[in-house]
Image (cartoon, grey):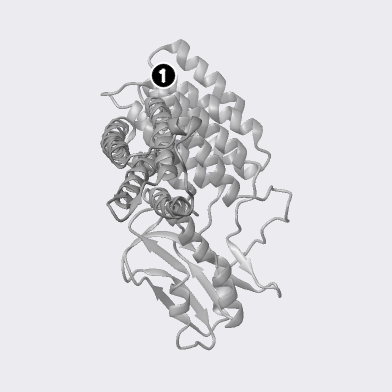
Amino acid sequence: MKKLLFFWSELKSTFWFVPVIIIVGAIFFAILILSIDGNLALKNEGIKRFFFIGSSASARSVLSTISGAMIGVAGTVFSVTLVALTLASSQFGPRLIRNFMYVRLNQVVLGTYISTYIYCLIVLNTIKDTEDYKFIPSLSILFSILFAVMNIVLLIIFIHRIAISIQADHVISEISVSIGKEVKKLFPETEDDKQEEPIIADLKEETAIYRKEISIPATQYGYVQYVDIDALLQLATESKSLIKLNYRPGSYIVKGIDLGTFYYHEIEEDILEKIQKQFILGSARTSQQDIELSIHQMVEIAVRALSPGVNDPYTAISCIDNLTSTLCYLSTKKFPPSYRFDDEENLRVITNAYDFELVTDVAFNQIRLYSSGNTAVVLKLMDALVLIHKMVKNQKYKDAAKKHARKVLNVGQQCISDKEDLEILTEKSKQILG
């Protein structure tokens, strides 16, 4: 079930999903309205003559005009979208193209224009004016006019959206919101929700109780997109075995490499195949279980901003602020345990789980390396670490902040030539390092 939900979530996030749904809906709506038109006898009398078309020539002219205009504007919308994607790719990095393609408004606009074009073609094909039979779908034509007006409003909204979508602050804010949603989904529990994770003193003793072991080979290459830990726990419990995983979602896997190790007493013929089915691999990383992906997007913007060709420290500082907010939120959350036990407290699954230090490394390592020579960014990094250190209560989390504070201080001592700026950095570091 979880894997089906994963595939459904990935399907909904594809660029073509919403436009296809809108187009299919337009086809069915056209059939419905035409059937209503066929059963209604609408007369162009009174005020209705201003809304309903009475001649077949006028009906064909209106529908032809609308359909031609819609497909023309759809081409313009595609062109504007590609220009925005090109600008975003060159300024913020090609990995952010997926974010722009996922914007629902862009998908709705493209789908609406194409669906209006198809709707008009379907209605246009039903107009008949012969000696034996005359059919003018007046109600359907009225809806085509309303769709055209609605599309004009959508075009204005679309242009406004595109204009602000390539601004650095807006892009950073959108990624920050995306990270916030993923963090809430992946780490729903606070530190006090459950007891501390049991400590395994010696993994060799845990694995030595099993008579045999076998590697779990990868059946294909690609990125680990999803791992069903609950299903692995159930398989290990039923077979009274232990599964140790070597990789987490986001890792790149080569075909034949060991995904993990299976420790057992007795083995079923298809147990390895069942275990391999709990891994979903693909050509690209996804954010379903990979918190690093969105953080890398934010880091990439900061690193590009710090490059000599761009030299935009304000964008980098904005990225640091948003990453700090994410890490402060994560400091209150309980990370998934590395050890999974069955109901009888037997160790069944060992995962390569995230921890606070790892996420902090992902957020700050690259920015720190590229901040050398930029005093404002180095000072901002230290301010961020001071804030994180104040917010966290877990000692391991504090140690992670201290580790990065020492590294930032070392960078500052090497690259900051102004004594006063260096003294400021040193004073800030004392709030963490003492």
Between 79 and 314, the one lying in front of the other is 79
* Residue on which disc 1 sits: 375
Quarter of the rendering containing residue 392: top right
Q: Is residue 219 left or right of residue 266?
A: left
Residue 415 is drawn in which quadrant? top left
| Quarter of the figure with the N terminus | bottom right
Residue pictured at 31% horizontal, 32% vertical? 84
Q: How many marks?
A: 1
184 or 368: nearer the eye? 184
Q: Is residue 191 left or right of residue 185?
A: right
The image shows residue 213, relative to residue 181, as above or below, that is below
Q: Quadrant of the C terminus?
A: top right
Q: In the rendered image of this protein, does residue 112 appear above or below residue 50?
A: below
Please, is residue 235 above or below residue 166 in the view? Answer: below
Crowding around mark 1 (Cα neighbors within 10 Å: few <14, some 14 to 19, many 20+) is: many
Nearer the observer, 44 or 224: 44
Q: Amino acid at mark 1?
A: Thr
Pick out the residue farthest to the front.
131
Residue 282 drawn at (x, y percent): 36, 60
- Whole-percent x and y of residue 254? 31, 64
| Camera sees residue 365 | no
Name the residue: 49% across, 88% down: 268
Q: Provide residue 66's location: percent of width, then percent of height.
A: 32, 36
For label 1, the SS is helix
Residue at (31, 40) in percent of width and height: 63
State the image coordinates of residue 283 (x, y, percent, origin top left): 33, 58
Q: Residue 190: in sight, yes or no?
A: yes
